[in-house]
Image: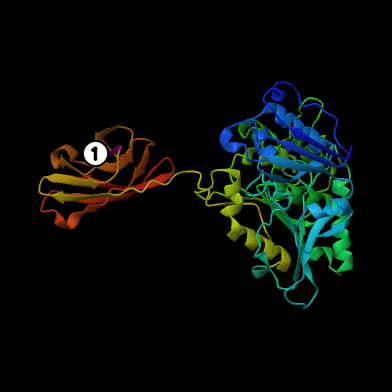
Amino acid sequence: MKELKIVLTEDMLKEPLDFELPTQTLYIDRSKVGDIKERGHNLIGFARREKRVTELVVRLASNGFFLVSSSLGNSRFEKFTTAKEFQPNIKVKNLQIYNNIYYTLEKPLLNFAPNRLIVIFSSVADRAFNADIAVRNFFTNFGTISKYIPQNSYILRIADVGGVIGNFYMNTTFSNTIEDDIQGLLKYILESNSIDKKDVVLYGGSKGGTAVLYHGILGKYKAVAVDPVVSDEYHEQHSKDSHFTKQYGEYRIYPKTKQEKFTTLMKTNNIPENINIIYSEKSPIYEAINSIIKENDKDNKINYINVCHPQIKTPPDVAAKTINILMLVINNLFYELAEIKSKDIDCSKTITKKIDIKAELKLTKLIIYTKNQNMSLRVYDDVTLKKYTDILLNESTTEISLFKLKEKLLSVIDTNNSIEYELVVDLEKSSLLSKIASYKNIAKNGKEFLFLAIG
């Protein structure tokens, strides 16, 4: 049976969708089931809401059936036999094949000196469940990158055809040669274009970052992985298994979890120089990278660049908000201008509170001005700084009798965290005949503060 057409009904979804698969083409019409507003969508979108359909989609991917198109709720899946036979389903200009791997190769803008190569692995698409396999499994990241790298650079983009949203450029239950095929493609491109390995940089974000980190270590290439997905747990638990990595019944797309793959990779390979990870402690992927990659990086070979941009909240934000850092690292790997090191960028561990405190002496009063909440005037009994009284300050102005402050040492304290600040007093406005002196360099807890003594 070369072709099969199935029309889903509500009754069919009460049981596992178990039927004999065709040898080539499968049509599944879901236009009569699910939310009426979504019946024109493809089967992958429906799988996100219907368990039986999820099981079916994983079963299809495990058997090499991939969604290639959809119209009015009717999804077409084609069986992958060889890359050449499957190629008409992927409508990408200048698409080429090597070892069952699809790729495009953009020539340098200029030819001078030894040519360089940047290899781009695709992230999850901006519309992850798009029916068009060319969009879903060969998403174009950074289409204008040629403007920002050496002009004698080839640009190799590698497709990730397989799975549901891609294979993450790793072996699957359907194909156990993907990793070797990709390594073979990289060697072929270098040899056929006379490119030295030292002039190659791998780059990718998210799913592409997973591939860059994995194949960079495996093949000993310079690499920049942006927020690589090195664990399945987050997307399984918090994103309804949006990467389709769980096992459903007897079927699963990936023979091993990413946690297992990367733990084994780190423990069984010598980590090369110039592997770089751009990530963020504000991303939920951060802890997995630290526990799986960093803790197993015993010789600290990898550079970890932690960027704390204030607008990073989700994994996709990391790539979007670190492009400046990305290009800095990529070009430095090409030109070798300076050593790249692990670094936290804009990641202050303590929040600096702007303190605005001023005061003036006027007749018999000390007037304190502050715009901050939870501030107090701390009045010390003597220079030992052991006994003191706190006077709560208002948010605007506070007037305190100088007679209460006679022969006292003063500072201002943030009552939330007990951090002291200097009290700035305008002495010129004072008309008092009493003794006024500033005492500096009075140390407390290893810090120095300015105190004002009034006698």
In the depicted structure, whether residue 230 falls above or below residue 212: above
In the rendering, at what x and y percent does residue 162 appear? 79, 44
Q: Is residue 371 left or right of residue 260?
A: left
Q: Is residue 390 left or right of residue 430?
A: right
Instruction: Quarter of the image for the C terminus: give it.
Output: top left
Q: Residue at x 72, y 38 (%)?
A: 292
In the rendering, at what x and y percent does residue 274 appear? 74, 56
Range of residues picked out in magenta:
374-381
Rendering quarter of residue 150: bottom right
Asked whether residue 140 appears in the rendered view, the answer is yes
* Of the pair 146 and 36, the residue shown nearer to us: 36
Dot 1: within a 10 Å radius of its alpha carbon, few (fewer than 14), some, or many (20 or more) residues?
A: many
Magenta highlight on residue 74: no
Q: Residue at x 75, y 40 (%)?
A: 296
Q: How many marks?
A: 1
Check disc 1 and give the amino acid type.
Leu
In the rendering, at what x and y percent does residue 103 appear? 80, 58
Rendering quarter of residue 173: top right
Q: Residue at x 83, y 49 (%)?
A: 218
Q: Is residue 405 left or right of residue 123?
A: left
* Of the pair 66 and 161, the residue shown nearer to us: 66
SS assignment for the magenta stretch, majority:
strand
In the depicted structure, whether residue 54 falls above or below residue 290: above
In the rendering, at what x and y percent does residue 165 appear? 72, 43
Tag 1 secondary structure = loop
Residue beneath label 1, please?
393
Instruction: Quarter of the image for the N terminus: give it.
Output: top right
Q: Residue at x 32, y 40 (%)?
A: 413
* Of the pair 401 and 239, the residue shown nearer to us: 239
